[in-house]
Image (tube, rainbow, N blue to C red):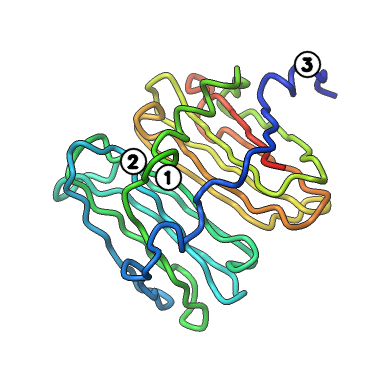
Amino acid sequence: MRPTSAVNLVRMQSSMSARAWDINEITPDGSLVQRVEGLTRKTWKFNDLSKDRVQVAVTSEGRPVHADVQLWLGPDWTPFTLKAYSEDGKLRPIQTLVGTRNKAAMIEVRNVGEYEFPFKAASNYAKGAMAKVHSEIPATTSGERCDGGALRSYPLSASAKQLEVVLNTDGKQLNARIELLNAPNNPKQTFEVFTNNGELNSLCVCFETPDAGNTVRIRNLAPVEFPCYIHLNEIM
């Protein structure tokens, strides 16, 4: 069993109000929302070189969500890929931040589910406090090192309403999976990331936790020479 002190190093508990992760915060007027049918894809283009972080959200009407989120830089470079799953896209939407490295970029969201499972997606530049989440959480927690092939699990407080997770590296590749479990070995939501640079493209996601009894499980899928660092922020 991990000592309590180690858990406290990686985790921060906050009573702050929930951040603007919701799809309606990304596009209040709904103009950036696109319906993505099963086995199809939609894209959003970003050309502001002064900004380096875009926000992506995917929701459904209660159906499962199977989505691939990719960052395209230039005609044939995809430095960041995120495979996301949610058992219920309304109760637990997909919510993440993607770094554009201050370059002209395109975000692709692909529905890899069947045609019976459409969903809605939106993406826009992160604004205000949301643009700093990827750096703010690591700055306020020491984090825990997770070597390649290692597994870490953290039980969540029953009063937690949201869980923000940041996985980063010191510039090496990041290849990891995060699972939100409710009851033994029952993943409600999953993110699997691969990027060639976990510093420029750290994984920053937010889980909604409407039920008690949740555990977050994180596995570093990379070889042992590619460690990553785990930072958690529970919002009460």
The residue labelled by disc 2 is 53
In the rendered structure, the answer to whether residue 185 lies left or right of residue 191 reads right
- Kindly identify the residue that appears in the image at 35 percent across and 29 percent down: 197
Residue type for callout 2: Arg
| Residue occupying image coordinates x 75% and y 43% | 215
Amino acid at circle 1: Leu
Q: In the rendering, at what x and y percent does residue 31 appear?
A: 31, 70
Amino acid beneath label 3:
Ser
145 to 216, vertically: above or below: above
Q: Are marks 1 and 3 in contact (CB under 8 Å)?
A: no
Packing grade of label 3 (10 A; few <14, some 14-19, many >=20) is few
Q: Is residue 99 above or below residue 26?
A: above
Position in image of residue 4 (x %, y %): 82, 20
The Cα–Cα distance between marks 2 and 1, rounded to whole angstroms, is 6 Å
| Residue under the image location 46 percent in, 24 percent down | 169
Q: Position of residue 218 (x, y in %)?
A: 64, 37
Cα gap from disc 1 to disc 3, whole angstroms: 29 Å
Label 1 secondary element: strand
